[in-house]
């Protein structure tokens, strides 16, 4: 099954991509639906070809195995990863970022989910998760924009 969510982010693509490169951003926008704790020190940086592992907890408390992320594309236009864990063997995540103007980016998450008999339940959770995650992204970007405007005015 496929989950696809799009939003217009109030930031240029370069800023969105720079934030996308930080584990802290994932942790901030996923909370409280999911918590990602790196298994290894090296798992805090993503590059094309890298594989990292995270202890995944649903709603921050329910252990959901070790989630592996293998990056197959990582550039300002798109990020593609092949992910999964013992409960969801296939979680293929593609992110596209299309600049709309100098301060707005169309951001799309598309995720292919295969989890056997659990697929429908995981798909329902993922639909809510990605809608929430994109709202958090927008809040994060607006907050940063407000901080920059406040500093500029001072």
Image (tube, grey):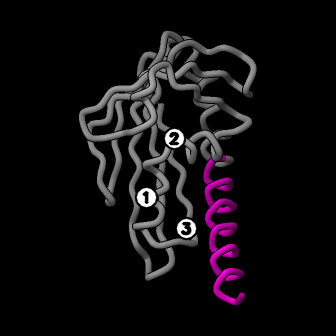
Relative depth, front residue between 127 and 75? 75
Q: Residue at x 48, y 59 (%)?
A: 107
Relative depth, front residue between 100 and 16? 16
Residue 153 is left or right of residue 101, and the answer is right
Q: Residue at x 69, y 61 (%)?
A: 139
Residue 47 at x, y percent in the picture = 30, 41
* Label 2–label 1 contact, CB within 8 A: no
Q: According to the image, label 2 marks what residue?
A: 23
Magenta residue span: 133-154
Residue 90 at x, y percent in the picture = 41, 22
Residue 6: which numbered mark, if any?
Answer: none
Q: Secondary structure at mark 1?
A: helix
Q: CA distance from mark 2 to mark 3?
A: 22 Å
User: Which of pointers 2 and 1 lies earlier in the amino acid sequence?
Assistant: 1
Q: Quadrant of the C terminus?
A: bottom right
Q: CA distance from mark 2 to mark 1?
A: 11 Å
Where residue 128 sits, quadrant-wise, is top right
Q: According to the image, label 1 marks what residue?
A: 18
Q: Residues within 10 Å of mark 2 (few under 14, many from 20)?
A: some
Residue 120 is left or right of residue 111, and the answer is right
């Amino acid at each position: 099954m496929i989950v696809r969510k799009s939003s217009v982010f109030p930031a240029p693509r370069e800023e969105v991509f720079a934030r996308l490169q930080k584990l802290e951003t994932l942790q901030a926008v996923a909370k409280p639906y999911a918590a990602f704790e790196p298994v290894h020190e090296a798992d805090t940086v993503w590059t094309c070809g890298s594989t990292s592992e995270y202890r995944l907890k649903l709603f921050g408390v329910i252990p959901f195995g070790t989630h592996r992320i293998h990056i197959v594309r990582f550039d300002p236009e798109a990020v593609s990863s092949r992910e999964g864990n013992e409960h969801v063997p296939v979680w293929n995540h593609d992110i596209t970022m299309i600049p709309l103007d100098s301060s707005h980016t169309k951001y799309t998450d598309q995720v292919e989910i295969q989890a056997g008999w659990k697929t429908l339940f995981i798909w329902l959770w993922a639909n809510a998760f990605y809608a929430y995650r994109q709202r958090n992204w927008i809040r994060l970007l607006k907050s940063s924009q407000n901080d920059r405007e406040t500093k500029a005015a001072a």
